[in-house]
Amino acid sequence: QNRPFGIIETYRDRLPTDGIDQIVTLGEGSTPLVPAPRLGDALDATVWIKVEGANPTGSFKDRGMTMAMTKALADGSKVVVCASTGNTSASASAYASRAGMTSVVLLPQGKIAAGKLAQAVVHGGRIIQVRGNFDDCLRIARELAENFPVSLVNSVNPYRIEGQKTAAFEVVDVLGDAPDIHALPVGNAGNITAYWKGYREYAADGPASYTPRMFGFQAAGAAPLVLGHDVDAPETVATAIRIGRPASGKLALAARDESEGLIDSVTDEQLLDAQAFLAAQEGIFVEPASAAPVAGLLKLKSEGRLDPRQRIVITVTGNGLKDIDTALCRTTLSIETVEASTDQVAAVLDFDS
Ligand code: F0G
C-alpha cells in the first residue's frame, strides 16, 4: 500500500514505538468525520460525527488495541487478558488472532450484546463469564496480570490510551483545528482521557491552536462521575457503559476541569431516543452507549445550557449492528409480505399503474 496502514504507521512519531519492529494492525483509524446538519439544526450548532463504529471490529477499541497488542508481542507475551462489557473483548480477541496470541476475556454474565459475544467466539477468545459486573471482571483481570504471565489490555494499560488519542489527531487533521466542544460517552473513562491527551499534545505542538471543552456523558443508572461516588450496582440498557467504578475516573474529572467541560448523565429513554434520531435523521446506526453524547447535548440544549453556534464533534463509539436486540425491541416492525409480483409490490406502495 502507498498509504500508511493503521494508526501506528500514520502517527508513528507521536506514539511510543521505540524498539517495535512488528506491528499488529487491522488497518484501524481514519474513520469518517460525518457532518450532521439535522442534529446541528436541533442543537443550533455545527456538528460532525466521528464514526468509530467504522473501525475493523466495529468500535474505537481497535485504536488502543493495535498499540497494546503490538507492545505485548514485542514483550514476548503469549496470552492477553481483559475485562469487558463487550467491545474490548471483541477487539482483543481479533487482534490476538492476528498476533498469534491467546486472548482471555472476562465478561459480566448475561450483560453482553450478542454481536460482541459472537466476535469473541469467532476469533477464538477464551471466554469466561463472571457472576458479577464489569468492575468485578476488571479487578480479577488486574490480579491475573499481576500474578501470572499474562498481559492486561484494558485501558489501564497506557498503550491503549496512546493509541486512542489518535482519534483527536484525526479530528484536527480533518477540520484544520480543534472543535469548540468534543462530546463522547464515558464508561471506564479511558477514552475521554485519551482524547484529552491527544488534543493537548496537538495544541502544544502546533497542529491545533487551542483545546476543546470535553463533554462526557454517562448513563443515569451508571453515573459515578456525575454522582461523585462509586455505584455498586450499575444498571443501564447501554451495556457498554454499565460501569460503577471507572478505572480512569480521576483522569476523566481532570479532563473535564482542565478543559472547562462537563460530565453529565442521560436516562436510558433519552439515550434510545437519540439512537433512533441518529439512525432516522443522519443515517448513522450506533449502539446505545454511543448515543449518550447525542442525548446529552440535546438535553443541555433543551435546558438552555448549550451556547449557540458552537463547532461540536461527537464521537459515536460503536456500531449499531453489535446490539440489534435493543434497537429492534423498541420499534414495531412494519414488514409487509407479498407474492413475488411487481403488481403486488406496486399495489402495496399505492403506485398508480
Ligand atoms: N462506548 C462504547 C461502545 C464502549 O464499548 C465503551 C467502553 C465506552 C463507550 C466507554 O469508553 O470505557 O473508555 O469510557 N467499553 C469497554 C469495553 C468498557 O469493555 O468494551 P470508556
Image (cartoon, rainbow, N blue to C red):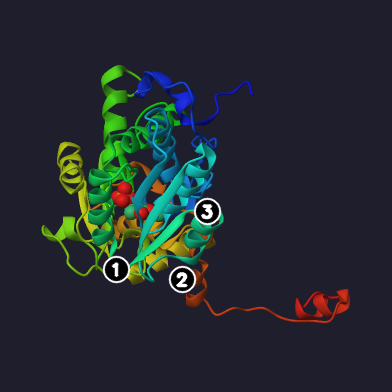
**What's the residue at 38%, 34% (across, down)?**
72
Rendering coords of residue 140 (x, y %): 25, 56
44 relative position to 334: left or right: left
**Observer able to see residue 304:** no
**Residue 158 visible to an observer of this rendering:** yes
- Disc 2 residue crowd, few under 14, some 14–19, many 20+, Cα 10 Å: some
For the residue labelled by badge 1, is the local secondary structure a helix, a strand or a loop? loop
Q: Residue 304, how many percent across, how many down? A: 23, 57
For marks 3 and 2, the one nearer the N-term is 3
The percent coordinates of residue 82 (x first, y second) are 35, 50
Q: Residue at x 23, y 46 (%)?
A: 147
Residue to which mark 3 is pinned: 124
Comparing 126 with 304, the one in front is 126
Residue at 17% in and 59% down: 224
* Circle nearer the N terminus (1, 3): 3
| Residue identifier under label 1 | 267
Three-letter amino acid code of the residue under disc 3: Gly
Q: Nearer the viewer, mark 1 or mark 3?
A: 3
How crowded pointer 1 is (Cα within 10 Å; few <14, some 14-19, many 20+) is rated as some
Q: Is residue 238 above or below residue 307?
A: below
Q: Earlier in the sequence, mark 1 or mark 2?
A: 1
Numbered disc 2: secondary structure:
helix
Q: Is mark 1 within 8 Å of ligand 1?
A: no
Name the kind of residue labelled 2 in the image.
Thr
Where is residue 11? Give x, y as percent.
43, 24
Q: Which mark is residue 326?
A: 2
Beta carbon at label 2 within 8 Å of ligand 1: no
